[in-house]
Image: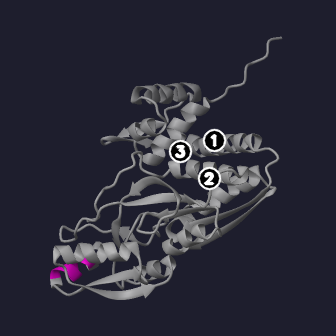
């Protein structure tokens, strides 16, 4: 009696599929995966042949998941996560020790759960201490040897070992566009929601409005990002941030009266060269998580806030 060969999906094709959908561009996915666009197209065709169903359909100038594609997407994410976790566990078998990680508040809620989950499952003997804080606080902790790694915005503060990663677009963010239009068209001072000084985005927002000749006032200050989001949801004003962790009740605001603001870089700081295997492993997983959401190209300027 002959045995049937079990059907299996090509993991690389699944990775291209998932990344292309998440980036809303298979050209960007091809660049991120260091493949040609035609190679990714061939993988998608192979994936549909293996699945025996159509997983993507044309929608305007782009592609949209079919019902079968949505189902495959859910399984593909789980398969890839398990694959990456198994690889991570085997490559760091027996890893022990401790790692101290710092994240600027914008990145905490977005990155920390997946990062800690993947790392702790793969390396249960490694103790991780995570700290969420402001830029200056994180860089100072690196300098003083209180943290091993810290993901921060690129500002005037730096450390001896800092790797620039990418530049992220900044957006004017608020509750709704109608309220913004009323503020701008009335000629009244635009209410700003900002961190306590010193703050990179506070300075950028004020400089941009001053250069555009738009009157402004500080309507709300907070020591936490959650405080700023709460004030924005209450309609107290607008803020300048990246899209990391943007709450569902808020939106990117667009208005011809708002000035453009250049993108802001992010950097991964470390307090010493990476000789500790546990620190090196966490850094590797962190960069893998970031690769799913960062722009493909590192740039000094980016999509302007409007």
The residue carrying pointer 2 sits among few (fewer than 14), some (14 to 19) or many (20 or more) residues within 10 Å by Cα, namely: few
| Quadrant in which the C terminus is drawn | bottom left
CA–CA distance between discs 3 and 2? 43 Å
In the depicted structure, whether residue 98 falls above or below residue 165: below
Please say whether residue 179 is visible from this viewpoint: yes
In the depicted structure, whether residue 31 falls above or below residue 283: above
Q: Which residues are magenta?
A: 180-185
Between disc 1 and disc 3, whose residue precedes? Answer: 3
Q: Position of residue 99 (x, y in %)?
A: 70, 61
Which disc, if any, is residue 190?
none
Residue position marked by numbered label 2 in the rendering:
273
Residue position marked by numbered label 1 in the rendering:
80
Marks 1 and 3 close (CB-CB < 8 Å): no
Main secondary structure along the magenta-highlighted residues: helix
Is residue 182 found inside the magenta-colored segment of the image? Answer: yes
**How is colour applied across the structure in the image?**
one colour
Between disc 2 and disc 1, whose residue precedes? Answer: 1
Q: Nearer the viewer, mark 3 or mark 2?
A: 2
- What residue is rendered at 33% in x and 54% in y? 300
């Amino acid at each position: 009696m002959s045995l049937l060969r079990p059907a299996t999906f090509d993991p690389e094709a699944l990775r291209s599929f998932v990344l292309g959908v998440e980036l809303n561009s298979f050209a960007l996915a091809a660049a991120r995966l260091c493949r040609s666009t035609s190679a990714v197209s061939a993988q998608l065709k192979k994936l549909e042949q293996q699945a025996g169903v159509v997983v993507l359909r044309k929608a305007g100038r782009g592609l949209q998941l079919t019902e079968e594609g949505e189902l495959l997407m859910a399984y593909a994410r789980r398969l890839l996560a398990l694959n990456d976790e198994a690889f991570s566990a085997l490559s760091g078998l027996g890893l022990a020790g401790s790692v101290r990680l710092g994240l600027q508040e914008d990145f905490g809620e977005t990155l920390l759960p997946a990062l800690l989950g993947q790392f702790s499952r793969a390396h249960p003997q490694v103790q991780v201490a995570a700290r969420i804080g402001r830029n200056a606080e994180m860089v100072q902790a690196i300098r003083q040897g209180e943290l091993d790694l810290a993901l921060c915005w690129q500002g005037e503060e730096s450390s001896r070992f800092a790797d620039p990663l990418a530049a992220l677009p900044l957006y004017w963010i608020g509750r709704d566009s109608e309220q913004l239009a009323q503020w701008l068209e009335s000629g009244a001072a635009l209410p700003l929601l900002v961190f306590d000084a010193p703050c990179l985005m506070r300075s950028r927002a004020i400089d941009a409005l001053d250069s555009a000749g738009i009157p402004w006032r500080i309507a709300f200050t907070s020591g936490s990002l959650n405080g700023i989001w709460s004030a924005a949801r209450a309609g107290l004003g607008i803020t300048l941030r990246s899209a990391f962790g943007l709450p569902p009740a808020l939106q990117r605001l667009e208005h011809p009266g708002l000035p453009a603001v250049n993108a802001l870089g992010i950097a991964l700081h470390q307090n010493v060269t990476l000789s500790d295997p546990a620190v090196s492993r966490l850094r590797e997983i962190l960069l893998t998580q970031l690769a799913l959401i960062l722009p493909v190209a590192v740039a000094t300027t980016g999509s302007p806030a409007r």
